Amino acid sequence: MRVVVDASVAVKWYLEEDHAAPARRLLDGTYELIVPDLFFAEIGNVLWKRWRRGELDDDIIAETLAALDRVPCETRSARPLLSGAMALATSLRRTVYDSLYLALAIDTGARLVTADLRFHASVAASPLAGHILWVEDL
């Protein structure tokens, strides 16, 4: 199954958070993972915020980034998705960042897996509901 994975799910691969177990199922080799290139910056920003709050040290961050680098995923440029993402963002009233993941899912015929409850609820209540999947529903 081809899935677009957003950063809200991927951080759970390495950090103990709610929904970590189902998120880690995406790494079992049965899923074809697709991400937009901004995915890596978003993961980095999450790690930096946790570091700033004293929740992570430099070694954990280095290990996490190395592990992330080993995840087999297809990376797509966000640039050609921007126009579609902007239209999605304005119609759903969600960020362009979140909407880039959804635009990628639509573009590739995949489903977006998210652990962002508000974003999931917005899309699930729209005609685009078939393009999104809650992380627990894997």
Image: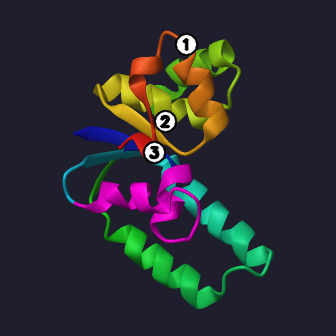
* Mark seen at residue 39: none
As for residue 55 lying within the magenta part, the answer is no
Q: CA distance from mark 3 to mark 2?
A: 14 Å
Q: Would residue 100 appear left or right of 57 to someone viewing this image?
A: left
Q: CA distance from mark 3 to mark 1?
A: 18 Å
Disc 3 marks a residue whose amino acid type is Val
Q: Residue furthest top?
A: 127
What SS does tag 1 mark? loop
Mark found first going from the N terminus, 2 or 1:
2
As for residue 27 lying within the magenta part, the answer is yes
Q: Quadrant of residue 2?
A: top left
Identify the magenta region: 7-28
Identify the residue shown where x is 31% and y is 71%: 70
Instruction: Name the residue that disc number 3 marks.
Output: 135
What SS does tag 2 mark? helix
- Residue 64 appears in the figure: yes
Instruction: Name the residue that disc number 1 marks.
Output: 126
The quarter of the image holding the C terminus is top left
Q: Position of residue 72 (x, y in %)?
A: 27, 60
Mark found first going from the N terminus, 3 or 1:
1
Identify the residue shown where x is 68% and y is 31%: 95
Q: Position of residue 113 (x, y in %)?
A: 43, 40
Instruction: Name the residue that disc number 2 marks.
Output: 101
Contact between labelled residues 1 and 3, with CB atoms less than 8 Å apart: no
10 Å crowding of disc 2: few (<14), some (14-19), many (20+): many
